[in-house]
Image: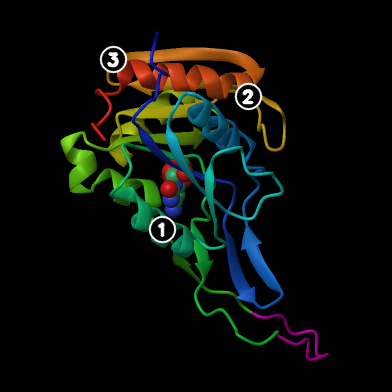
Amino acid sequence: FAPKLLAGHRLLITAGPTFEAIDPVRGITNLSSGKMGFAIAAAAQAAGAAVTLVAGPVHLPTPRGVQRINVQSARQMLAAVQSQADQASIFIATAAVADWRPANASDQKIKKDGTGDVPALAFVENPDILASIAQSPRAQSGALYCVGFAAESHDLLQHATAKRVRKGVPLLVGNIGPATFGQDDNALLLVDAQGHRELPRASKAALGVQLVQELARRLPPAPRA
Ligand code: C5P
């Protein structure tokens, strides 16, 4: 009898884009289908982990057995993650979080005034959810294993290596090749302190399973219940 790979672990994972309101009917967002994060959530659940998925606005069904928390903005995503992080033993950030939000969202619809004048938008920076969780005492002590993702257009290995250090995470996963937004397949580059390893192009479902296997090899033993 072999125990499941992630038995005893609690995975917290973000997925999808965030949406940052300009007014009640407008906003800015990022391109992200959420498919890679949902596939990892499903694979981890099948591997025996208790999974909480914090999802931005996406059109995807909740994987079976996964607890889902829906959010819109980066600040809501951060609050949801913070409310769950103390229970987690793994945190994976796949969400495409908007780097900035409008500084002064209007609570009423901004009206066209007919003069041709356009509104000027000012932005403020959003919190970096991954970096803030990676700096927490539980992550620093190794009790919470943090994984970041990177979508780069060029020099992936170089950028992913630098991003791993900058975010302060043991494992950084890069999306290889052209943008995979909305696609059902992907290819991944795993970068950790030991080096790097490619997971060749495959369905996001298959890559989710492989990533869970890679995780299981790197994790400390599951916390005792
Ligand atoms: O810095 P960059 O956005 O390229 O970093 C990508 C990684 O950081 C992803 O894992 C993403 O989910 C996470 N991230 C985050 N909060 C942000 C920006 C990025 O959690 N505000």
User: Is 115 colored magenta in this rendering?
Assistant: yes
Can you tell which of label 1 and label 3 is closer to the viewer?
1
For the question of whether residue 155 can be seen, the reply is no
Percent x, y for residue 55? 56, 51
Write the start and end of the magenta stretch as one range.
Answer: 110-119
For the residue pair 148 and 120, the one nearer the viewer reads as 148
User: Is 156 colored magenta in this rendering?
Assistant: no
Which amino acid, by three-letter code, is at mark 3? Gln
Position above or below: 193 against 99: above
Note whether ligand 1 is within 8 Å of mark 1: yes
Q: What element carries label 2?
A: helix
Which residue is depicted at the point 33% across and 42% down?
A: 88
Q: Distance between the residues labelled 2 and 3?
A: 26 Å
> For residue 78, which numbered disc appears in the image?
1
Specify few, some or many for label 2: CA neighbours under 10 Å numbering under 14, 14-19, or 20 or more: many
Q: Is mark 1 on a helix, strand or loop?
A: helix
Q: In which quarter of the image is ligand 1?
A: top left
Q: Quadrant of residue 63?
A: top right
N-terminal of the pair, mark 1 or mark 2, is 1
Q: Where is mark 2, residue-wise?
A: 205
Q: Where is mark 3, residue-wise?
A: 194
For the question of whether residue 147 can be seen, the reply is yes
Which residue is depicted at the point 49% across and 56% down?
A: 99
Q: Quadrant of residue 32?
A: top right
Note whether ligand 1 is within 8 Å of mark 3: no
Which amino acid, by three-letter code, is at mark 1? Leu
Q: Distance between the residues labelled 1 and 2?
A: 26 Å
Prevailing SS of the magenta stretch: loop
Percent x, y for residue 158? 41, 25
Position above or below: 4 against 78: above
